[in-house]
Image (tube, coloured by chain):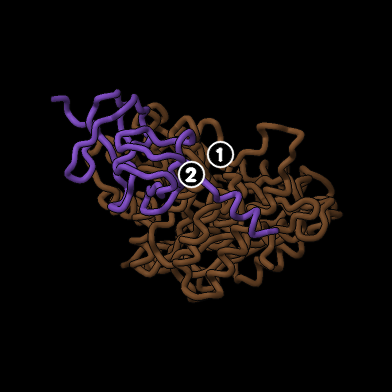
Amino acid sequence: MKIMGYRRADGRVGIRNHVAVIPSVFCANNVVERIARAVEGAVALRHPVGCSQVGYDLELTARTLSAMGTHPNVAAVLVVGLGCERFKPTELYESVKKSGKPVEMLVIQDEGGSSSTIAKGIEIARRFIQQEKNRSRVECDISELTVALKCGGTDATSGLAANPVVGAMSDRLVEHGGSSILSELNELIGTEDMLAGRAINKDVADKVYAAIYGIEDKLRSGCDERYAGRNELISPGNYDGGVSNIVEKALGGVYKGGKSPVTDVLEYAIPARPGQKGLFLMNYESHDGEVVTGMIGCGAQVVAFTSGRGTPAGFPLAPVIKLTGNSFMYNKMRENFDFSASDIIEGTATIEEQGQKLFEMVVEVANGKLTAAEKLESYELFCVARALGGHNNTLP
Amino acid sequence: MKKPLRSLVLSPEDTVAVLLEKGSKGDIVTAGDQPIVLLEDIEFAHKVLIKDSAKNAPVIKYGVEIGYMLAETPKGSWIHGHNMGCDRGKKRREQLK
């Protein structure tokens, strides 16, 4: 099966053709935003990091920003640095250049301040847009497509309808040779035996246990007996909604990954090895923005995001498909949703039927159809993960 | 007779069904081919036991054990934290000792 995408110099396939303006440090945010605002089609990647960081925390910033710059949904990159930051703009520039993409760099301290940098940046971004204006999509195999799987603003219908529908879609994509990424491992505590049982070999099974236990032990170490009621993994809303314990809650979430074998466990914002396909786990937690940014950093070009309560959040570089099993919220926040799985709750459709429909929507979106979040230019999900103190969140 | 409540059995081996609408004592859900009478009021999206279960019997949803019965419980009962135990957290703590 084929999709229409953009083949990049490094061989990867994108489904959007963005000109990205990326600050190497938060001090450059205003300059970056003013450049992007002045140039139709340019996208700013505002973030709060890039300085006063050490160790794994700084590594995560460097890795994530490089992953955004080299992402296949990006056609060309303008890096804007301040000049004295810990994460050097030249490191970001060099990593994008290595991928073969057009890239330029401006450093505010060298350019002589904000206004002159903005003026030059606008010129460069306009040139990139001009160069990309006539680029047309080419036929690519659907096996090049990776979908990030996410739930947020969960309600009782998420685990019964929307998440299983995403799982059925994911299984269809994997059958066609494509890939999907499931993460939010803190929400999967209790499903480790099932996931490890689906691992393609013993090494991957061991990685599944290490990742889920690692997150569980980290959470436990953060529990504090002084603050009663602040140490629970399931919320009062979950419980009132009929979810009795973390295992049941986790099962409602894990079905976003369908029933496919687990190919590997990826680290935050590090793509799978070339040729590796199928269902992946990514070793991270469930902050909506941080985990989506990590999965896109792992190479996902599109996100399937279930939400029973409704969330408008989107991502600057990748389409986010919003779906719900809650017909009331679907109608109430209609402009923020792309897909309703509520027929399952009404009893008029099966999970398989809705999964096939969602799969077709993923293909349409890959081919260029804009999602609700793209039309609204919602970019909140771009958040670089932090790793402060002794929590280094790595596999042993 | 009243129309059966809409409900969902997520996997064939499940011992619970999920109500897709609010149910009252005496309402009926159909699980497989057998009608089950609700023994109490049960909220939307909450679980009803569809198989008489002994003390310590596993509670199965999504085809997976989500907990165990704290006491012998007849089908038609509401299943939640008051009558279902879950040792997942304890198991990990013991592993770490």
Please say if A27 is above or below A77. above
Identify which residue, A137 or A222, lies in the foreground.
A222
Q: Chain of mark 2?
A: A
Identify which residue, A115 or A384, lies in the foreground.
A384
Q: Tell me, yes or no, whether the two marked residues, 1 and 2, touch with CB atoms within 8 Å.
A: yes
| Whether residue A121 can be seen here | no
Q: Secondary structure at mark 1?
A: loop
- At 49% from the left and 36% from the top, the residue drawn is B81
Residue labelled with disc 2: A249
| Residue A332 x %, y % | 39, 26
Among the 4 quarters of the image, the one containing residue B73? top left
Question: Label 1 vs label 2: CA separation?
Answer: 8 Å
Q: Amino acid at mark 2?
A: Lys
Q: Secondary structure at mark 2?
A: helix
Q: Amino acid at mark 1?
A: Ile
Quick one: label 1 or label 2, which is nearer the N terminus?
A: 1
Please say if A107 is above or below A138. above
Q: Do the residues indicated by labels 1 and 2 lie within the same chain of the protein?
A: yes
- At 65% from the left and 66% from the top, the residue drawn is A96
